[in-house]
Amino acid sequence: MTQTPRNGNPAVAVVVLAAGAGTRMKSATQKTLHAIGGRTLLSHSLHAADTVDPSLIVAVVGHGRDQVEPAARRVGEELDSDLTVAVQSEQLGTGHAVQCALPALAGFEGTIIVTNADVPLLTGETLAALSAAHTEVPTAVTVLTMEETDPTGYGRIIRNDAGEVTAIIEEKDATAEQKRVTEVNSGVFAFDAGVLRDALTRLHTDNAQGELYLTDVLGIARADGHPVRAHLAADARELAGVNDRVQLAAAGRELNRRTVEAAMRGGATVVDPLTTWIDVEVTVGADVTILPGVQLQGRTVIADNVTVGPDSTLEDVEVGEGAHVTRTHARQSVIGPRADVGPFTYLRPGTDLGEGGKLGGFVEAKNATIGRGSKVPHLTYVGDATIGEESNIGASSVFVNYDGVDKHHTTVGDHVRTGSDTMFIAPVTVGDGAYSGAGTVIKDDVPAGALVVSGGHQRNIEGWVQRKRPGTPAAKAAEAAERAAEQQ
Ligand code: UD1
Ligand code: CA
């Protein structure tokens, strides 16, 4: 299904560079497809791009294109934004990458913002501030800069005696004096489209890396007499690039710090922010308590007054108001309001626990709807089932859903009481208000209000162990018990 993307601001377009090899990641996965906070680096950068409401986003892909291109298109659809993929088949430098984006921008007159897909912490607010600074006074090139106590690896911002930016010099091309400059290029720019197009035709590879540097556009524009400026970012942490897995973890930690802080500002108590991990698309309500060791992942939604943890992982789980979830692993499930889950409980996809329901210790559920007020308190597997309201499933029961070839469904009515160790051999239906005895194997449907039992009367074969297992510890124990009984 293709829909017409919404129209953005006709004066702004964003180019996101994602064609580099990212060799320092040492990965079969292209660098920008590594994820933090539940989103790939590429997705983070496209989300940031989208917040300035551009009329067009151009993602430049090259290395690992077969992975990166479909990923970029998926995010574009998710954002409902006009996204075009441009291909840079050979990575000849950041300037060359932007050249590859130009055909997609044919006829565009306005501000072209260029960002790198390996800068995942960049916020929309910072991009908007850059864009505003760029248009406030007529400017041809605005580079987003930051102060780094250790500027190693970054391009240095060179200023003249008047404090005006004159050039950006890459680390590998810098003199010892230039290397001491601590204001560096974040890799994010705003360009006047016409100036950028013209300067890109005049780049050269006469530098230490033999590449076409985007950074040279600034110097060329200035030499042509165009106004160029630097916009210093308030928070350098936002502009940290991810080039290896150590930086990936650091960026993930910083992103999580922000997400957890937002949850706390929204009224959640987070007992241990350092062991609480919340993905960016998670929603956390007010008066929620999150105990140590919790991971809230994907599109998980936590309503007000919920307690989660300790030690729980919820992925794409909806938790209703006032529910308690303790030491639980749950995926693609719904936990109703005031329901009680855990400890040591596993909710697999398709579990839907009703209001006030319970899934207790060592219970596993999958593709199962458990009605309002129904309880599965202990040691039970509930697979492919519908349980009505206010029913209770005895300890150690199994919904036997698989015959070795096909999966089958079990339906249990309202107000049912089943005994411990009941086996529901699917497909089978248990009517409203029915009971089962302990150890029942239910193979046929049970009518409403019936008590179902299975298996014959109990038979004790006296002395079997002493005769058939003579000399064993069990036989000796039995003999001792017999002697003790005789002496009484
Ligand atoms: C670049 C800047 C540097 C800046 C730093 C900030 C240049 C020449 N240098 O250096 O001034 O301080 O970013 O992080 O621009 N890419 C392509 N095609 C290419 C080369 C790179 O798409 O041919 C993409 C990469 O995927 C990446 C981005 O451009 O997303 C930056 O490339 P990278 O090689 O990491 O540049 P740096 O050396 O970090
Ligand atoms: Ca980089």
Image (cartoon, rainbow, N blue to C red):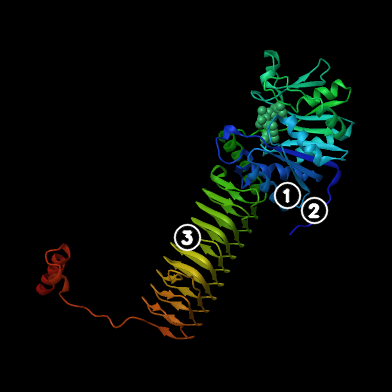
Residue in the foreground of this view, choosing between 17 and 337: 17
In the picture of the structure, the residue carrying the numbered disc 1 is 76
Q: Amino acid at mark 1?
A: Gly
Instruction: Respond yes or no on whether mark 3 lies under 8 Å from ligand 1.
Output: no
Task: Decide if residue 460 is on the left or right side of residue 291.
Answer: left
Gap in Å between the C-alphas at discs 2 and 3?
Answer: 43 Å
Callout 2 crowding tier (Cα within 10 Å): few <14, some 14–19, many ≥20: some
Q: Position of residue 384 (x, y in %)?
A: 51, 70
Q: Which type of secondary structure does the marked residue at label 3 adopt? A: strand
Would you identify the image quadrant in which residue 11 lies?
A: top right
Q: As displayed, is residue 6 above or below residue 274?
A: below
In the picture of the structure, the residue carrying the numbered disc 3 is 345
Residue contact between numbered discs 1 and 2, judged by CB atoms under 8 Å: yes
- Quadrant of the picture in which ligand 1 is shown: top right
Q: Is residue 95 visible?
A: yes
Q: As displayed, is residue 297 above or below residue 49?
A: below
Q: Which type of secondary structure does the marked residue at label 1 adopt? A: helix
N-terminal of the pair, mark 3 or mark 1, is 1
In the picture of the structure, the residue carrying the numbered disc 2 is 5
